[in-house]
Amino acid sequence: MSRFSLSRRAALFASVALLAASFAAPAAAAGDPATLTVITRLTDTGFDPAFHFAEFDGMDVLNLYEPLVYPQKGAAPSGHLAESWDSPDAKVWTFKLRKGVKFHDGKDLRAKDVVYSIDRMLTINKGYSYLWAGLLKPGTTTAVDDYTVKFTLERPFGPFLDTIVQFFVLNSEFMKANTAKEGPFGDNGDYGTAFLKKADAGSGPYTLAEVVPDSRRAYKRFDAYWGGWKDKQFNRVVVQLVGEAATARELIAKGDVDFVDQWQPVEFYKNVAKEPNVTVPETPDMKLYFIQMNTQRPPLDDINFRRAISYAFDYKTAVEQVMGGAVLGQGPIPSSMPGFDASTPKATTDIAKAKEFLAKSKYKPDQFVLEFQFIKAGVHEPISLLFQANMAQLGIKIDIKAEQWPVLTKNAAKPDTAPHFFPVYNTAKYPSPDAFTHGMYHPQSHGGWQAASHYANPQVTKMIDEARTTADAAKRNKLYADAAKIVVDDAAALWVAYPFHRVAVNKRIKNYQHVGVMAFDLRAYNLRYE
């Protein structure tokens, strides 16, 4: 606090007091230990599983709804709403549903609800629906009986089970009763999209209790939840939006909140870990931090120029100082992801090698000024400055520029507008290397921000396609890993690190576990208090 001016300190304390007052009713500090209070700096948009795509809405979806299968740390998904499944050919997938699951209005969950939910998601075509583009169509999923549902894919798709961790089931009858007749989806009107901006239609352990847009939302315990309830579980969850890291630190240090999610600066977690009542779990994430290189834009269309750049970057400083500690990168597949191959070459700094490759390039370093575009958040800006200084050793000029995320994603969509360099985080959306190979280095993914390298290698494309149609997980992951090694040799990016996942947790909270798949650590039902 000593670095703040008096006026800034007064403003900070005023904001803390105001926020503390907003927590007064629900917070544990007010005498209710069964209330979990969470801070996030990410805005909320609604409570519709057809649209969710990131952590800010992922937390809502995970607490209000449920998937057929649930991701497990370092292992294949386990059954959740589905008790068992079968697929002899990776094309037709049959799931047996759990009996006794009730929606929040008391109706039993049936196969027809699964059919409605997947057809709705595919028709709306937002959020994670891209995972099944060209694989599933509305009308191809059927209810065999009340507790058996069959998905018929267009072609075999081995990672299907992994991807459906991001498919959540809605109450079809409740949704139909709350669907506006007028809307963009034909006979389905607005498909209930307006209704789900302020309500839920799930079977999860919590129901939506309160919504204050861009400020706060709250869930309350669903007593009839099929998983049952035990002592020391949370009856209520309050999620509060707090933009300032200093304010978040004050609140959790004082015990006014229980949990701060992962989207604070590294310094926040280092500092708050010193508080006597706070712990900061730190685990390697199924996440990649990498600097994408536009392989279609000169001079990065030359493999030797790209290799020179990859050897000139100071990974040690980036990992240890800028990122505050992380696992050094070894290609696109994170080290905690099933299918990671430890024999993949590690990111290496070697200026002599960099100069050797630059000498082999058909381009000279003084022919270009290369664009490095980034979003001004987290480590991106200091990484850009480090990169600029490192490349100067080779005589390569780098123009660094901060842009808004919509501008960056629009630019990244085409090879002639994508910058030469674009640093991003890519968190596992599902527990398969497919997310880090097909999603980044297959031509079908070009146009997405994760594929801003616009990389294309026919051999890699063939290997990824073969992996996707392979039913055996071990064989499938071996193909992904071998394809990733070729991408590394082609220097399609700088795979800087697999960052640590950090959150700040009040020591009264027990059973916290980081799963590794986007937002799945934020399910309040799994937590306990003391």
Image: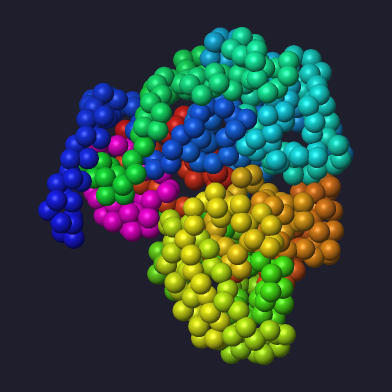
Q: Could you tell me residue 143's position as x and y percent?
A: 79, 18
Q: Could you tell me residue 361's position as x and y percent?
A: 70, 85
Q: Could you tell me residue 220's position as x and y percent?
A: 41, 20
Image: magenta residue range:
255-281
Q: What residue is shown at x 68% (from left), y 63% (from top)?
A: 416
Q: What residue is shown at x 76% (from left), y 56% (from top)?
A: 442
Q: What residue is shown at x 65% (from left), y 38% (from top)?
A: 128
One can see residue 73 in this view: no
Q: What residue is shown at x 49% (from left), y 57% (from top)?
A: 403
Is residue 180 one of those drawn in magenta?
A: no
Q: Could you tell me residue 379's position as x and y percent?
A: 44, 61
One can see residue 252 in this view: yes
Please identify the quarter of the rendering in which residue 464 is found.
bottom right
- Camera-side residue: 427 or 481? 427
How many badges with numbers are in the image?
A: 0
Q: Is residue 178 left or right of residue 271?
A: right
Please identify the quarter of the rendering in which residue 159 is found.
top right
Q: Is residue 280 above or below residue 344?
A: above
- Camera-side residue: 272 or 410? 410
Q: Is residue 451 above or below residue 493?
A: above
